Image: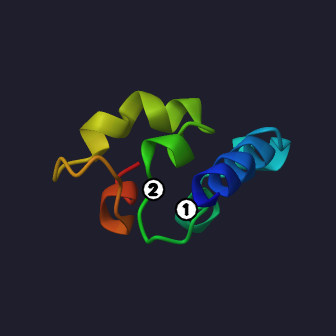
Amino acid sequence: MKHLNKALALIAIASSSVVFAASDFNSLDIDGSGTISPSEAAVDTDLMAEFIELDTDGSGELSKEEFANY
């Protein structure tokens, strides 16, 4: 159920034009984990294009520090 809720939240946010304009860390960190996952970053095509380069520690997620380089 937790994964379903997260998926539904991501779909709802992705359909919002506000999120497409969002470029700040807190707006993209949907689950409040303190990192941006690829599924959270997917709402921003420019961010996704740079995601691998920004993920300097190779964790598969962006920290606030890594996102600051975006």
Disc 2 residue type (three-letter): Ile
Query: Left or right of 34: which side holds 8?
Result: right
The numbered mark at residue 36 is 2
Q: Which residue does the numbered mark 1 point to in the structure image? A: 29
- Circles 1 and 2: CB atoms closer than 8 Å: yes
- Could you tell me residue 16's position as x and y percent? 83, 44
Which colour style is shown?
rainbow
**Image: 64 above or below 22:** below
The disc, 1 or 2, on the residue closer to the chain's N-terminal end is 1
- What residue is at 52 percent from the left and 32 percent from the top? 46
The quarter in which the N terminus is drawn is bottom right
- What residue is at 43 percent from the left and 28 percent from the top? 49
Is disc 1 surrounded by few (<14), some (14 to 19) or many (20+) residues within 10 Å?
A: some
Q: Secondary structure at mark 1?
A: loop
- What residue is at 26 percent from the left and 37 percent from the top? 53
Q: CA distance from mark 1 to mark 2?
A: 5 Å
Q: Secondary structure at mark 2?
A: loop
- What residue is at 16 percent from the left and 53 percent from the top? 57
**Image: 34 above or below 19:** below
Disc 1 residue type (three-letter): Asp
Q: Nearer the viewer, residue 42 or 23?
A: 42
Query: Left or right of 25: which side holds 6?
Result: right
**Image: 59 above or below 32:** above
Is disc 2 surrounded by few (<14), some (14 to 19) or many (20+) residues within 10 Å?
A: many
Q: Nearer the viewer, residue 35 or 4?
A: 4
The numbered mark at residue 59 is none
Query: Left or right of 12: which side holds 59?
Result: left
